[in-house]
């Protein structure tokens, strides 16, 4: 077995659970049908990839997956295995429920919602995803994101912000020492409107209450068809406040401005910051390749492919809202010594594990380990 530390960590965190399990493909098929999951079945063999069972509405992600696996298969001609791949964002059950804006689930029959909001503005229809407990005793599924309570096998996300994901290009024009802005910045484009994954709302709430030290907001280039310059409705924000995701002292009429197209900034402005805040996403390649120091806020219930690659306080800074200020202080000590070291390490780690050719190489080794479990 290859002695690479990151590969071994990845094997432990993705395969060890399944080593002692009896794999039940029939049960997985029943789960796919029951929860209407977008999961495809692929055969990797003889330098090629064949679709054995295709799911709907997943063309782009499935095509990227197949292209990548073809490159892996050509490099590892001894690969002869079958995988199931979830082509939605997160491996879970994307259920929806109706809540009143006070935070209470209701069985009330409401005929019409517009962008998830009832006509009287007192109810919302929102994703209320759940882990699928029976999945953990069925058959492993590869996924781009996984609920931490489910044992999916994490798969590369390919950089959803970069159509040419086979190239690793640093678009940052500024060296770290030349970056002019020290206040950490976050600009989100999708709030992830799911009751179980509202971690980005935590970030915005924190920044609103600490606006002298942080600049965390949502933005968009365009206008919303209903909410004009805003990316979220006031009923949604009132609901979030009533489930304790937004501080009760906050005025929603003011807070909504943190979710506005007015907050849009171009990439050069963002990259002129010494500290960039991210959350788990398929759109972070440009930040990982940049000359800024990256601080990442982990989802409580979601896990991403890169989390086994980048190590905390060595390649990246994983933070929570209790330790952010302290970590920023550490990063700025001794003329930013730790910041510069972490940036250098992150780029080395990216090139070794996430640059496309190297990713093909080590993920192929991982698939050979997966293949052994199926024999």
Image (spheres, rainbow, N blue to C red):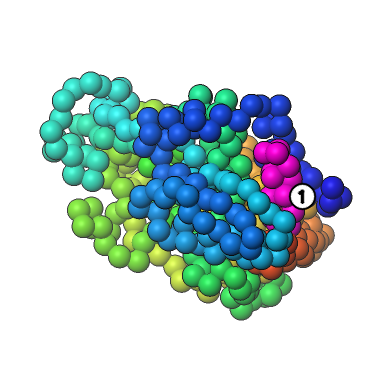
Residue 111: image x %, image y %? 13, 33
Residue 371 painted magenta = yes
* Relative depth, front residue between 117 and 139: 139
Q: Residues within 10 Å of mark 1 (few under 14, many from 20)?
A: some
Magenta-highlighted residues: 362-375
Q: Quick check: 139 left or right of 112?
A: right
Residue at the spot x=77%, y=50% of the render?
Answer: 6
Count how many numbered circles sit on residues in the image: 1
Horizontal and vertical percent for residue 32?
42, 35
Majority secondary structure of magenta residues: helix
Vertical position of residue 293 compared to residue 241: above or below = below
Residue 188 screen position, x and y as percent: 45, 55
Task: Tell whether position 59 is magenta.
Answer: no
Q: Residue at x 64, y 44 (%)?
A: 319
Give above or below for 38 relative to 282. Answer: above
Residue 96 position by quadrant: top left
| The residue positioned farthest toward the front in the image shown | 46
Residue under numbered circle 1: 7
For the C terminus, the quadrant is: top right
Quick check: can you spot residue 304?
Answer: no
Residue at the (54%, 64%) spot, across then down: 67
Determine whether, in the image, residue 283 is placed left or right of residue 294.
left
Q: In the visual, does 51 lie left or right of 110?
A: right
The residue drawn where x is 40% and y is 58% is 59
Q: Give coordinates of residue 241: x percent, y percent.
A: 37, 33
Q: Is residue 4 visible?
A: yes
User: As rendered, which of 353 and 338 lies closer to the eye?
Assistant: 353
Question: Image quarter for residue 229?
Answer: bottom left
SS type, badge 1: helix
Q: Is residue 142 left or right of residue 93?
A: right
Of all residues shown, which one is farthest toward the right? 3
């Amino acid at each position: 077995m290859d002695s690479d530390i990151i590969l071994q960590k990845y094997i432990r965190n993705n395969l060890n659970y399944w080593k002692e399990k009896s794999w039940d493909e029939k049960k997985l098929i029943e789960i796919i049908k029951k929860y209407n999951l977008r999961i495809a079945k692929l055969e990797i063999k003889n330098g090629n990839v064949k679709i054995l069972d295709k799911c709907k509405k997943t063309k782009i992600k499935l095509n990227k997956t197949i292209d990548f696996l073809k490159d892996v298969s050509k490099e590892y001609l001894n690969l002869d295995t079958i995988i199931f791949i979830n082509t939605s964002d997160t491996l879970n059950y994307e259920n929806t429920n109706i809540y009143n804006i006070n935070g209470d689930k209701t069985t009330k029959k409401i005929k019409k919602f517009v962008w998830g909001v009832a006509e009287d503005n007192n109810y919302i229809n929102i994703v209320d995803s759940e882990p699928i407990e029976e999945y953990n005793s069925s058959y492993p599924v590869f996924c781009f994101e996984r609920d931490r309570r489910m044992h999916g096998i994490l798969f590369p996300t390919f950089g959803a912000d970069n159509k040419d994901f086979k190239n690793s290009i640093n678009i940052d024009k500024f060296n770290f020492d030349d970056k002019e802005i020290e206040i950490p910045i976050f600009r989100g484009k999708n709030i992830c409107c799911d009751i179980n994954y509202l971690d980005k709302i935590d970030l915005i709430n924190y920044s609103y209450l600490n606006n002298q030290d942080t600049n965390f907001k949502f933005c968009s280039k365009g206008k919303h068809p209903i909410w004009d310059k805003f990316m979220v409705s006031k009923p949604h924000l009132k609901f979030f406040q009533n489930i304790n995701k937004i501080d009760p002292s906050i005025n929603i009429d003011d807070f909504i401005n943190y979710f506005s197209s007015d907050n849009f900034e171009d990439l050069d402005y963002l990259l002129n910051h010494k500290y960039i805040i991210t959350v788990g996403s398929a759109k972070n390649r440009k930040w990982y390749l940049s000359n800024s120091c990256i601080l990442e806020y982990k989802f409580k219930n979601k896990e991403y492919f890169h989390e086994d690659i980048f190590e905390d306080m060595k390649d990246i800074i994983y933070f929570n809202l209790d330790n952010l200020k302290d970590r920023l202080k550490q990063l700025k000590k001794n003329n930013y010594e730790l910041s510069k070291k972490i940036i250098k390490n992150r780029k080395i780690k990216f090139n070794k594990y996430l640059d496309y050719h190297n990713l093909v190489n080590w993920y192929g080794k991982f698939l050979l380990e997966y293949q052994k479990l199926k024999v």
